[in-house]
Amino acid sequence: MKINYIHGRGRSTDLISKPGAAPYIAIRPFSEFDHIISAFSTRLGGVSSSIYESMNLAGNRGDDPENVRKNFEIIGRTLGVPAENMVYAHQTHTSNVMRVTKEHRGMGIIKERGFSDVDALITNEPGLCLVTGHADCLPLYFIDRESGAIGLAHAGWKGTAGNIAGNVIRMMGEEFGTKPKDVTAFIGPGICRDHYEVGEDVASKFRGIYGEVKEARVLKAKPSDGDEPKYLLNLHMANYYNMTAAGLAMEDIYISDVCTFCNPGLFFSHRYTKGQRGGMCAFLMIRE
């Protein structure tokens, strides 16, 4: 499977495809962290069919729950992470962050969650795999190089406008003593600006946050046939600015070079399929 990379961006990801394993996206900047397992799944290598073909990891889209469970087992074997060691966020487009421990193992995967309305997870416990679901919205990965703590977030436009990235950094500081200068972050695969059209209702949430120059890079006016103005929203750039505002160094923030909308054969895309789709997952874990 060929990836359509975003022109002008340096390579930050690789498609890993091995016989007998599910293909996944590897994060190049994290290759230096031997103690970390990180990945982003594709829509390939699973058992689901129809609009969910084939590695559907979204359990709330109407797919057979048994197929979703099997898909988690498959991707788990590929990554070397048992499904029972995963904890899946309960995403409702909030900017809420929760610390998870081993008592949360398996929640959202093989057993019911004991929490709700959480779009970002943090931990410092080895062997506990953080999981967030995606199908255009961005995964945000955080690694504290000093304390070893990690964070993973789901950032759609609501979470981005609510500064979920900043909330993750703040809570990692409160829970683990994380300092922003020690964090390496990756803004993962999602919809690119060229295909993310929004109306004035969404655009207004981003005005006045970044300053005139930065705002022009986040929002681009688009010619509209109707009375309502249209814009192209750059979620990657908005989250980048949120991270720098939280104190992360520019050189420690990496941005994905692939778009979910531009690669419908490789990824599920909510916009591309008009909602008829499954979902991928982001994974982040400290090795035991």
Image: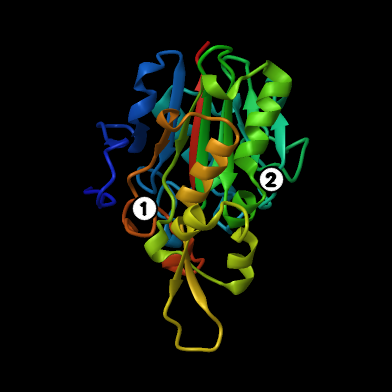
Compared across the picture, whether 248 is left or right of 93 comes to left
Q: Amino acid at mark 2?
A: Ser
Percent of width and height locating residue 282: 49, 38
Q: Residue furthest front?
A: 212
For label 2, the crowd category at 10 Å Cα-Cα, with few meaning under 14, some 14 to 19 and many 20 or more, is: many
Residue at image position (33%, 45%) is 257
Q: How is the rendered protein coloured?
A: rainbow
Residue at image position (51%, 66%) is 275
Front residue of 237 and 164: 237
Front residue of 238 and 155: 238
- The quarter of the picture where residue 170 lies is top right
Residue at image position (62%, 58%) is 208
Compared across the picture, whether 40 is left or right of 153 comes to left
Compared across the picture, whether 215 is left or right of 194 comes to right
Q: Amino acid at mark 1?
A: Cys
Q: Which residue is mark 1?
A: 259
Q: Which residue is mark 2?
A: 95
Dot 1: what SS? loop
Front residue of 254 and 57: 254
Front residue of 281 and 152: 152
Residue 74 visible (yes or no): no
* 9 lies above or below 244: below
Give the number of the disc on residue 64. Answer: none
Compared across the picture, whether 253 is left or right of 96 comes to left
